[in-house]
Image: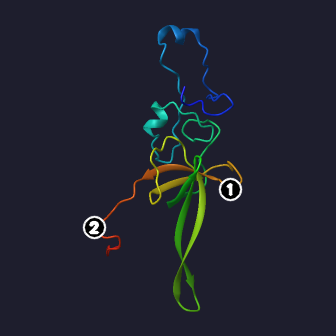
Amino acid sequence: MAEQTEKAYQFQPGVFQNSKLAAKKKAGATKRWYCDVGLGFKTPKEAIDGTYIDKKCPFTSGTISIRGRILTGVVVSNKMKRTIVIRREYLHYIPKYNRYEKRHKNLSAHLSPAFIGVEVGDQVTVGQCRPISKTVRFNVLKHQKKIIKGVGAKQFTKF
């Protein structure tokens, strides 16, 4: 059982695991509960077919619901366990000089094991949920790989 990596026994709260009928039918098959978070986001294939157990995952946990803001940003750190830091850049208008200045905010988000291979530089879409920890109030809903354009590191792109 690869999903049992914690000291406490990990299980999905809505699934009864000791059914005698299920043991007779298929010995290797396990029951899995998953849901659709709505708002046009698809449930990842790993959440449906995988064996991971995460009580903070919006796809496999009934206790986390996505409501409020939907934001997009770039991953700047994935060093924490199941948590990433996202950077959101925006322009702030200065009326005195009639110009804009660049600003940014960092945002911590829970990264479900359903998203495999999220690296620094990838673009993710996060949805607001209840407070998961001291700094985490968002959950990753969609992941897009970093697109490398051209040969050089800095090339002109038209918007």
Tell me if residue 13 comes above or below residue 132 in the rendering: above
Residue to which mark 1 is pinned: 135
Q: In the depicted view, which residue is nearer to us: 151 or 63? A: 151
Specify few, some or many for label 1: CA neighbours under 10 Å numbering under 14, 14-19, or 20 or more.
few
**Residue 107 in the image, given as x and y percentages of width and height:** 60, 60
Q: Amino acid at mark 1?
A: Thr
Given the current orientation, which residue lies at the most extreme left position? 151
Kindly identify the residue that appears in the image at 58 percent across and 57 percent down.
69
**Residue 82 in the image, given as x and y percentages of width and height:** 58, 46
Q: Amino acid at mark 2?
A: Val
Image quarter (top left, top right, bottom left or bottom right) of the N terminus: top right
Point out the frontmost of discs 1 and 2.
2
Q: How many marks?
A: 2
Label 1 with label 2: CB-CB less than 8 Å: no
Helix, strand or loop at mark 1:
loop
Task: Specify the label residue 98 is tagged with.
Answer: none
Give the side of residue 118 with respect to residue 106, left or right: left
Quadrant assignment, res 106: bottom right
Specify few, some or many for label 2: CA neighbours under 10 Å numbering under 14, 14-19, or 20 or more.
few
Helix, strand or loop at mark 2:
loop
**Residue 91 in the image, given as x and y percentages of width and height:** 52, 76
Give the side of residue 111 with respect to residue 117, left or right: right
Kindly identify the residue that appears in the image at 51 percent across and 87 percent down.
99
Residue to which mark 2 is pinned: 151
Tell me if residue 120 comes above or below residue 158 in the rendering: above
Given the current orientation, which residue lies at the most extreme bottom position? 97
Kindly identify the residue that appears in the image at 52 percent across and 72 percent down.
90
Q: CA distance from mark 1 to mark 2?
A: 38 Å
Give the side of residue 85 with respect to residue 74, left or right: right
**Residue 21 in the image, given as x and y percentages of width and height:** 54, 9
Mark 1 vs 2, N-terminal side = 1
